[in-house]
Every structure is written in C-alpha cells, then in structure tokens.
Amino acid sequence: MNLLTRVLFGCAVLTLSAGEMYTSLLNVRQAISVERKLIDDLRTYIDHEFERLQDIRRFYAKVSDLHTGLYKGPAAAMGNPLVAFTLIKRLHSEWLNVIYSSEASENAQALRSSYEEEEAELPKLEDLQGAAKGLMRLQDVYGLQVKSLVRGRFQRVTDGKPADICVPTISVPLSGDDCFLVGKVAYEQKDYYHSVQWLEESVRLFRGVEWSPENEGTLEDALDHLAFSHFKTGNVSYALSLSQELLHHDPKNWRVLQNVEKYEKLLVSESPHSSNGLIRPSSNHLRTRDTYENLCRTQGSQPMHFENPRLFCDDFTNGDPGLLLKPVRREVLSLQPYVVLYHDFITRSEAEDIKQVAQPGLRRSVVAAGEKQATAEYRISKSAWLKNSAHSTIGKLDHRISMITGLNVQHPYSEYLQVVNYGIGGHYEPHFDHATSPSSPVYKLKTGNRVATFMIYLSSVEAGGSTAFIYANFSAPVVERAAIFWWNLHRNGEGDVDTLHAGCPVLIGDKWESLLYRSEQLGHICAALCIWRCYC
C-alpha cells in the first residue's frame, strides 16, 4: 500500500512558464529582474529621445534667431546671395529632414525590439486574470475590505469597525486602473458581486486624477462596467445614475442611451428590480466553504479544540537509538484524526538544499480528474518531482522520517518527492490525500493508496497558509522547519473522512510544499499503526 505523503515549504528561483506566472510566487519574484531590464531599455530610449529633442531645440533656436535678428534687419540682407541661398536650402531640405526624420521611429522601434526580446518572460493575460482572482480569493476567504486593500491595508470589519488582521512589512496602494482590471476580470465572469466592489473603487480613484497613458481603463470604462454590474445585482436606480454620468463624458454613446431608457422604464414599472444589497454567491462545488474559511481566518486559534487536556507535548524517541541522544519535540495537535507536529525537524541548510534542487522543474500543479490529471482553479501552485538521487539531503530526510514514524520510506516503494510552491492567493481547497475512487490516477502508479502524510515547512509566511482540517474543525499554522504528520487511512485500509483538509490561501508570504507518496508492506503498516494508536 502507498504509505506516505510528505510536504515541504521554502523559497527558490525558477525559469518562468508561459501563462502560469501567477501560480508560483517564485515566478513573480523572477519577473522583477525582467522589469529591471525593461527599465534599462526605457532609460536608453529616454536618453536617445533627449538627444533627438536637443537637436530639434538647437534647430529651432537657430531659425528663431535668424527671424528675430537677420531677417528683421534692412531689406538689403536678402540681397546677399549667401543669405538667400541658406534660406532656400533650409526650406528645401533642413525642414524636410527635421519633419520627416526617422530617428523618433527608430528609437521607438529599438524600445519595442527590446521589449519583444523579453516577451516570453512577461506575464500573459491568464496571469493577469489569475492574479486578479487571487486577490478576490483573499478578499473572500479572509473577509477583507476592498477599500482597505486599495490603500494597501489588510483589514476586515470587526465589531463594526475595520481592523488590521496583519500588517505587511511592505505595502503598496492600488490605482484606479488596478481596481478596474480586477473588476473587469470579475465582470467578464459575470461575477457582479466582486465587480461592483472593485469597480466602485476604480470610479472613485479615476474621478480624482487625470488619466495616464499607461492605463488600460478610463473613468468612462469603469462607469460603464459598474453601471451594468449594479443593474445585474438589482440596483437599477444607481445603474441609471452612473449611466447618466457616463453620458456627460460620452453624450453620443448609443448603447448607454438605450440603457438609460431601459432603466427609466424599469423604475416606473409596477415591478421594478429590487436591490437587497450585495450578496455573495453560494458555492456549488465547496459545500464546506463556511467552515473552511472560518478555520483559515482563525489560523490555529480554536480554543474548543486545543484546550483538550488529552493533547500534549513531549520529547519523542519512538524507541529508536538514533533519537535517544537528540529526541524530537512532538506536539499532538489532534486525536481524531491523529495529527502531530514535530518541531525543528529540518535544518535551514537542508531546507535550502531541497529548495535549490526543486527550483528548475516547477510546473503547474494538477489534481485528479476522473482517471486523468488536470489543472484546477481550486489548486493554485506549481510542483516539481525529485528522485531520491537528486540530492543526498532527500535520503537523510527519509531516514529521519523512518526513525520518527517507524515506517519504511525508501524507494522503490514510493512515488518521487513532489515539491510545490503556491502562487498569488495560492491555495488548495478541501481535499483528501488518499484516493477516494477506484479510478483515481493514484492506482495507476501500482503502489496502492496513500496511508499517511508527512509535511515539512521549509519557511514561514507572514499571514495565511494554514492547514485546515475541515471535519476535525481545527487549523494548524505554518511553523518554520517543523513537520506535521497524520494518517489518511484506518487500520482496515478505509479512508479516514476526518482527514479532509485544505491549504488556506497565503495572505502574505511565500509558501512551498512537497508531496511524496510511499508504499510499504502491509505487516509493517499495521505494526506502525499500532505504535501510533497507542499514543492516542
């Protein structure tokens, strides 16, 4: 049977993958160097344009001086053939060369060429949409106020007042165009609950500043999208007001004129659309959404669970001679399912080894989709698979896990180590690690089902990223260099439904994980299960 799921967290540097930058914070960090190159290219363009404009200013000064000096003098000046010649020559060729100079287009083309050289490493439309969805996911799961996010604050309403849930070390406000693009992504998905909130902020910010050429949206665009979003949520009167404001900017917009007529008729009809305020749509695929989000928000603060007197901490050796001189600090987090945290399981240098080895192979993470595997919105991350021969540290960790669990975790009775890095608002919604269907891709590996999970944190995060156990009703926050362990199957091989768990979205920070599924002889598994159940 497949024995062990192992999870690792950390940092690394990675080559960007087209259209999937948003799924790995590592890719986002690497994009900084791409923009630095673009900044250098833009500086070169500015320098060349400055030189070009300096030449034009010099020509302007020369001609202006002639008209304020020589040409205002005695008429005899034109009698001088040299003066007459220079005038004719200047009008015939010099003005022509200035007006039709290709230098400006050459400079612009050089900038475009430099940009195109970096284009493969630039975010695609999917990245922009994915990043916007990540912000909306954080908004929902952590109950964040959009007005606060726009100011660079992470706040939710508590006792009727906005309160910080975390204070990032680095913060940046959002522009009207930033908000417009997030709102537009929601709008295009017919998600008017989110589009209203983000477009409201976009309109407010656009009203207060002049339009900038780097912006994709305008005040008119934001008003247009916001008006229809309010109409779709039942707020017809506000949709009418916004449409009328839009007509002040674009009075001949035929479509908006039609909308105004439509809204006015609705408002005077016997059964106008009623507005009950914004209501978040229910989730068809996530029945445990409320529990999941509450556990993510409380981040390990569940007194009803953790005040259980049967939970304990101790120095654990598992009867292994290798742990007698240096036992591991064990903290039992739950009895059903049995979940335990091992503090200081891995050293910083070992964590760095795993990160460095994993970085070249990260690709978009997949989930089981029937008998196949596919990417999914409910899992936003990238993964890399490592063989045991990839680095000696992997073997050391295998041996340490064996000492602590009493389980054989050596290849070939396992899948390879899977290292995962989450992206913007990266998460993994409630799921089981073990296969729940005979058609699961897990069985194609011919190693049986997944018996247990061993998860190692290679780095910390500032906020979010907890592991939430849905039916057990508790969450475990990320603890740097610690490892968390639980059994996925009962002794009879049936899946333990209490192990339904989720990776909460990372609010601030860079979270990594790796999954390794290992197999073991049934007798050894039963013996190990007995060992662990005795401690329960």
Image (tube, grey):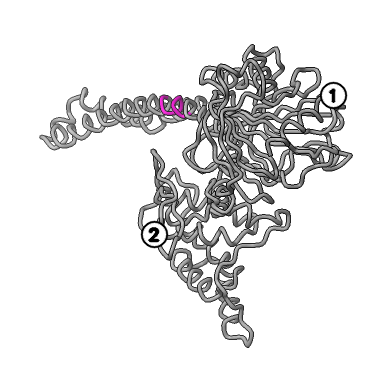
Residue 482 location, quadrant: top right
Which amino acid lies under the numbered mark 2 shown in the image of this protein? Arg
x, y percentage for residue 35? 46, 29
Residue neighbourhood size for the residue with mark 2, other residues' Cα within 10 Å, grouped as few (<14), some (14–19), many (≥20) = some
The residue stretch that appears in magenta: 35-40
Q: Residue at x 49, y 40 (%)?
A: 508
- State which quadrant residue 255 falls in: bottom right
Tell me where residue 48 appears, x and y as whole percent: 36, 25
Query: Which residue appears at 38% of the width and 33% of the height?
Result: 99
> Up-down: is 245 above or below 525?
below
Q: Amino acid at mark 1?
A: Gln
Magenta stretch, main secondary structure, is helix
Residue at which label 2 appears: 207
Q: Secondary structure at mark 2?
A: helix
Q: Is residue 328 left or right of residue 215?
A: right
Marking on residue 389: none
Cα–Cα gap, marks 2 and 1: 68 Å
Spot the residue most to the bottom.
270
Q: Assign a secondary structure to mark 1.
A: loop
Q: Residue at label 1?
A: 521
On screen, residue 287 versus residue 524, left or right, reads left
